[in-house]
Image (cartoon, rainbow, N blue to C red):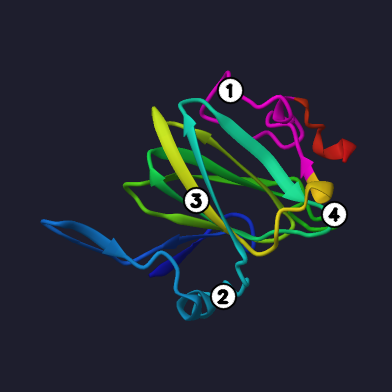
């Protein structure tokens, strides 16, 4: 298992050791002590699983008071996964990083507390699972509009399919 740093401090890609043979593959998707050795020290308390079709864009989401770090991976299909620094006063505030995660490359992205998270589906269908370090808190849920020009995310989709809520999210500067 190895860590690949991204352009944002704290956001990393994790490449697990995958054992393949004629039967298929095996990997350890999470072993606490190994992640601690990699510097990922969150205590995960909740797992989420979503299924989406091509061009669905979910996000950008974060929680205000009960921040959640997330460990994201794709079981099936391919997504463009994005993290945006929303920590006021951070030198990288408003900056983003995006990476392709898929059932084929088996990469995981660790998104620390203080970052908004979202993804868009590049394949016909994708299943995404992610571990969270705090419970979902509806009162603390926040969102940023996917195409905020101040952030300038280079999404690989022009006309995404959004939820009603995600289509009405404010810009980062309005939060």
In this view, which residue lies farthest toward the right?
174
Q: Please state which of the two labelled residues, at mark 2 or mark 1, is closer to the viewer.
A: 1
- The residue drawn where x is 71% and y is 30% is 166
Q: Position of residue 165 (x, y in %)?
A: 74, 29
Cα distance, mark 4 to mark 3?
28 Å
Q: Please state which of the two labelled residues, at mark 3 or mark 2, is closer to the viewer.
A: 3
In this view, which residue lies farthest toward the left?
22
Cα distance, mark 2 to mark 4?
23 Å
Cα distance, mark 1 to mark 3?
19 Å
How crowded pointer 2 is (Cα within 10 Å; few <14, some 14-19, many 20+) is rated as few
The tag on residue 129 is: 3
* Residue labelled with disc 4: 88
Dot 3 falls on a residue whose secondary structure is strand
Q: Is residue 81 left or right of residue 164?
A: left
Q: Please state which of the two labelled residues, at mark 4 or mark 3, is closer to the viewer.
A: 3
Image quadrant in which the N terminus is located: bottom left
- The residue drawn where x is 63% and y is 56% is 8
* Magenta stretch in the rendered image: 142-167
Which of the two labelled residues, at mark 2 and mark 4, occupies the earlier sequence position? 2
Cα distance, mark 1 to mark 4?
29 Å
Cα distance, mark 2 to mark 1?
35 Å
Image quadrant in which the C terminus is located: top right
Image position of 40 with respect to 125: above or below: below
* Residue labelled with disc 2: 39
The image quadrant that residue 41 belongs to is bottom right
Which of the two labelled residues, at mark 3 and mark 2, occupies the earlier sequence position? 2
Which of the two labelled residues, at mark 1 and mark 3, occupies the earlier sequence position? 3
């Amino acid at each position: 298992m190895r860590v690949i740093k991204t352009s944002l401090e704290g956001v990393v890609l994790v490449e697990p050791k995958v054992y393949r043979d004629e039967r298929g593959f095996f990997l350890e998707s999470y072993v606490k002590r190994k992640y601690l050795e990699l510097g990922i020290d969150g205590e995960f308390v909740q797992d989420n699983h979503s299924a989406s079709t091509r061009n669905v864009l979910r996000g950008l989401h974060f929680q205000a008071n009960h921040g959640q770090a997330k460990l994201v991976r794709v079981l099936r299909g391919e997504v463009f996964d994005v993290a945006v620094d929303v920590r006021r006063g951070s030198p990288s505030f408003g900056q983003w990083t995006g990476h392709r995660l898929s059932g084929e490359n088996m990469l995981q992205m660790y998104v620390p507390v203080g970052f908004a998270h979202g993804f868009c589906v590049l394949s016909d269908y994708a299943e995404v699972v992610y571990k969270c370090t705090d419970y979902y808190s509806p009162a603390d849920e926040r969102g940023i509009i996917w195409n905020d020009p101040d952030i300038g995310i280079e999404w690989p989709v022009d006309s995404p399919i959004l939820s009603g809520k995600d289509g009405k999210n404010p810009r980062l500067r309005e939060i």
